[in-house]
Image (cartoon, rainbow, N blue to C red):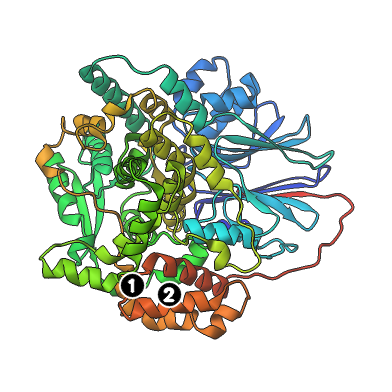
Amino acid sequence: MGDALAHRGPDDFGTFRDDTAGLYLVFRRLAILDLSASGHQPMTSASGRYVIIFNGEVYNFEEIRAELSGCQWRGHSDTEVMLAAIEHWGLEAAVKKFVGMFALALWDRQERELHLVRDRLGIKPVYYGRAGADFVFASELKAIREHADFDGQIDRDALALYMRHGCVPAPHCIYKGLYKLPPGHILTISAADGVPVLRQFWSATDVAWSGLRSPFTGSDAEAIEQLEETLLAAVRLRMIADVPLGAFLSGGVDSSTVVALMQAQSGRPVKTFTVGFHEDGYNEARHAKKVAAHLGTEHTELYITSEEALAVVPLLPNMYDEPFADASQIPTYLISKLARGSVTVSLSGDGGDELFGGYNRYPLSRRLWNLMKKSPRLARKAAAGSITSIPPGWIDQTFRLFGLRLSAPGDKAHKLAQLLRAETATEIYARSLSLWDDPSRVVLNTSEPRTVLDSIDAAFRLPIMDEAMMLVDLVNYLPDDILTKVDRASMAVSLEARVPILDHTVVEFAWTLPLRFKIRDGTSKWILRQVLYKYVPAALLERPKMGFGIPIGIWLRGPLREWAEDLLSETSLAHHGMFDSAIIRMKWQEHISGGRNWQYLLWTVLIFQDWYLHTDHRTVPTRPLAHPSIVSAG
């Protein structure tokens, strides 16, 4: 199990066992702080009561260390400080003091309890569940699959969620009997009864409501200054490392802000990294180069050919362990690999869209709902029917005839028609987040859990629609998609990615800001831009938002076609009996003919098919053990 995670920790290997409790811990270390043997894990507390394995970083460990006067320190690692804090304040109180990203397992020898903890925003992963009679947990599923009693039954309900969202949202897992620990939670299991108990120590939803009840009341200048100070502190903490450090730079607002604040606090040029594509519609490298030049960073850029990007596809099943269909996983891996050639730690700009209203779907969904509220239901349905009666290709031709430039206008019009059939604002946003609108038609014998839909319902109790959408994404899309993508892609090359915008103090301050600070006069991330404009001229940033994507639709009709044809054949689709192959085959034929652009729907199927083909799904009989054990790999 530990060997399966060697990529997450190539620098050191450690084990711990407590035979009286049937507990076994394994740890792989990526050395970032205190590179000496004093940072070795598993680590035992000074009193001998606690044993910890810990993935991530607690950035404010020096501050906590100063509070714990009188301790006899053995080294300089954050892990040792965490153990001392837990002994002094107790687990939950200590965790609430930690600033950073962390997935940790703590064995309490005195109480004979194991605690699993995942950080507030879900930056670091924790999987857990049963393998035979054993309780198992790990940072990635590939470690659990190494357990002799691993049972690889696919959870069809989780598969339905995946088909809708392109990822498997927490707490679900693609395998039956295994789960993801939700962000901001502690799981406790006793050696006496073996029953896991969950409790929450931090809630993004509670933070949102608290911020809205006690909003920031200062001026624009005061808000900008406070955000800048909070971000500067968050970036400064994440620049602490005993190894080379750099940053991803796309040239967008979020990554440019992080790099600008790094350079402002660095005595030497910050190492920055960008990957670019030769296709103009997918290339941000030239913008990043201009920002890097202005800030004076040591910039490295790499232009990727389609062949180099396609070479990543065979790596995805092992990299992500679960089917994961965010195609930006490919450039994320490539930029991580590029950065790892020079640094061990890289800062990233993730989180700005969710906190400061950056996604294009926010204003589009709001405007659509405001328009729909004024239109009779029958009129909306009639309009939707009229749109869908026109083939997308005809709409595309009409746009070209009049010289109008818009990517896939026919497909966008048909997507709009689906949204026009929505009855509520929550339904509009749920549909806008859906790849397959009705996964139960595609996945056989399934009942899709309401996990994300219930979260959307809860978030839309907020009084303002934009804020509700931002909360939905902060709780779901961010940890389940964005942070999963960054963690697996960076860890695959033994690179630690840090996300300063997701410092919980930044999150908490952002939620006190009224919406006018985030979206003003049609400009998203208004206050974040004001901070950035102190360091980078607005002219270098003002351009339409461009996702970190790749031309999947084009590739499926070209260099990926043979690969896709094989995975979407009748034989391949029928192999596991999961899908209604007729629906998928129809989408595929429409796509390759050019009649429709089904790239995102097809990518979910293709990724699942490829993952299933290259992953061990053995099913083993459960072997009863006299004393169930707790087995882990961290």
Q: Locate residue 553 relative to residue 221 in the image: left or right.
A: right
Q: Picture coordinates of residue 256 (x, y %)?
A: 23, 41
Is 232 located above or below residue 247 in the figure?
above
Name the residue at 76% across, 33% down.
Answer: 109
Q: Are marks 1 and 2 in contact (CB under 8 Å)?
A: yes
Name the residue at 40% across, 35% down.
Answer: 502
Label drawn at residue 587: 2
Q: Picture coordinates of residue 455 (x, y %)?
A: 53, 41
Q: Locate residue 105 relative to residue 388 in the image: left or right.
A: right
Please state, as top left, top right, bottom left or bottom right, where the N terminus lies in the image. bottom right
* Residue 76 visible (yes or no): no
Label drawn at residue 596: 1
400 or 104: nearer the viewer: 400
In which quadrant of the rendered view does residue 95 lie? top right
Q: Locate residue 442 relative to residue 286 in the image: left or right.
A: right
Q: Locate residue 472 relative to residue 559 in the image: left or right.
A: right
Label 2's element? helix
Q: Which residue type does callout 2 highlight?
A: Lys
Label 1 crowd (10 A; few <14 / some 14-19 / many >=20): some
List the single residue furthest toward the right.
Answer: 626
Label 2 crowd (10 A; few <14 / some 14-19 / many >=20): some
Q: Earlier in the sequence, mark 1 or mark 2?
A: 2
In which quadrant of the rendered view does residue 542 lie? top left
Q: Picture coordinates of residue 46 (x, y %)?
A: 65, 27
Q: Picture coordinates of residue 184 (x, y %)?
A: 56, 35
